[in-house]
């Protein structure tokens, strides 16, 4: 594969989709590596965007992976990493944020738009203060039902709203990458191994398409 991302250093932070081996911390991470990028990924299960400002307890665990190394998973007493410290540590060209499902309020009648906006702006303001380019990945369709009460309607509402809130980050709409229900899940929200491979491959292609524009800013 052509190294179309050679020389680009990515810092990726994400929610539960990045907190287990064979999730996106494996599949998206590998896809970007194969395209020549430098990649360091951090996942924190259940945390909102605003909870990446400080070190926050993640009740369902965290994970970290650097380069072609193994996925390191943390469970008891796991905490997230403050975004400022991560940017200083990794020194990325591009920060990729993938946080959506944790703020979509599945199962509630109304989506808390003001609260979502405040969370997003808290994080994007810290990233842009470092003068680093940013890409925000929206939620995927998943499957309807399950313990998280996810619905296609709310996933679409959340994605459409996020797209208006994440600037100056470039928005990647995961819903545009597959048909509803195409990527299979085991609980409505989290994907099968094949599903994460499909999402990771599609995301890597979409992210790569954003990079020429991002390079122009450096």
Image (cartoon, rainbow, N blue to C red):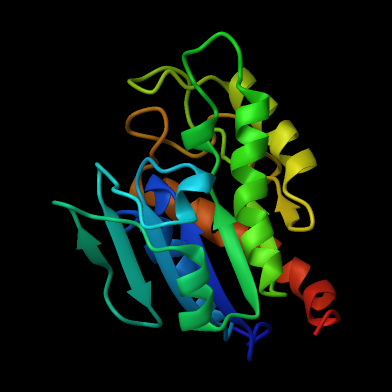
Tell me which residue sits at (29%, 47%) in the image: 58
Tell me which residue sits at (38%, 65%) in the image: 26
Tell me which residue sits at (35%, 51%) in the image: 56
Q: Is residue 79 above or below residue 91?
A: above
In the rendering, at what x and y percent does residue 106 appear? 49, 20
Quadrant, the C terminus:
bottom right
Give the left or right position of residue 82, taking residue 61 as reference: right
In the rendering, at what x and y percent does residue 159 appear? 67, 35
Give whichever of 51, 146 is nearer the camera. 51
The quadrant where residue 111 appears: top right
Give whichever of 179, 174 is nearer the camera. 174
The quadrant where residue 47 appears: top left
Q: How many marks?
A: 0
Tell me which residue sits at (41%, 48%) in the image: 17
Quadrant, the N terminus:
bottom right
In the rendering, at what x and y percent does residue 41 appear? 43, 68
Give the left or right position of residue 113, taking residue 213 as reference: left
């Amino acid at each position: 594969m052509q190294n179309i991302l050679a020389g680009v250093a990515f810092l990726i932070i994400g929610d539960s989709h990045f907190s287990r081996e064979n999730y996106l911390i494996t599949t998206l991470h590998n896809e970007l590596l194969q395209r020549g990028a430098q990649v360091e990924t951090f996942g924190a299960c259940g945390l909102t965007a605003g909870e990446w400002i400080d070190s926050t307890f993640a009740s369902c665990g965290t994970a970290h992976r650097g380069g072609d190394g193994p996925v390191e998973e943390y469970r008891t007493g796991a905490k997230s990493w403050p975004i400022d410290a991560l940017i200083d540590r990794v020194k990325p060209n591009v920060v990729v944020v993938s946080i959506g499902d944790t703020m979509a309020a599945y199962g509630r009648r109304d989506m808390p738009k003001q609260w979502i906006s405040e969370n997003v702006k808290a994080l994007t303001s810290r990233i842009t203060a470092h003068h680093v380019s940013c890409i925000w990945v929206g939620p995927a369709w998943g499957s309807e039902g399950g313990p998280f009460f996810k619905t296609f309607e709310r996933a679409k509402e959340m994605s459409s709203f996020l797209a208006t809130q994440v600037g100056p980050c470039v928005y990647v709409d995961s819903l545009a990458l597959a048909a509803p229900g195409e990527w299979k899940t085991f609980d409505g929200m989290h994907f099968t191994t094949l599903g994460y491979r499909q999402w990771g491959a599609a995301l890597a292609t979409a992210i790569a398409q954003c990079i020429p524009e991002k390079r122009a800013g450096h």
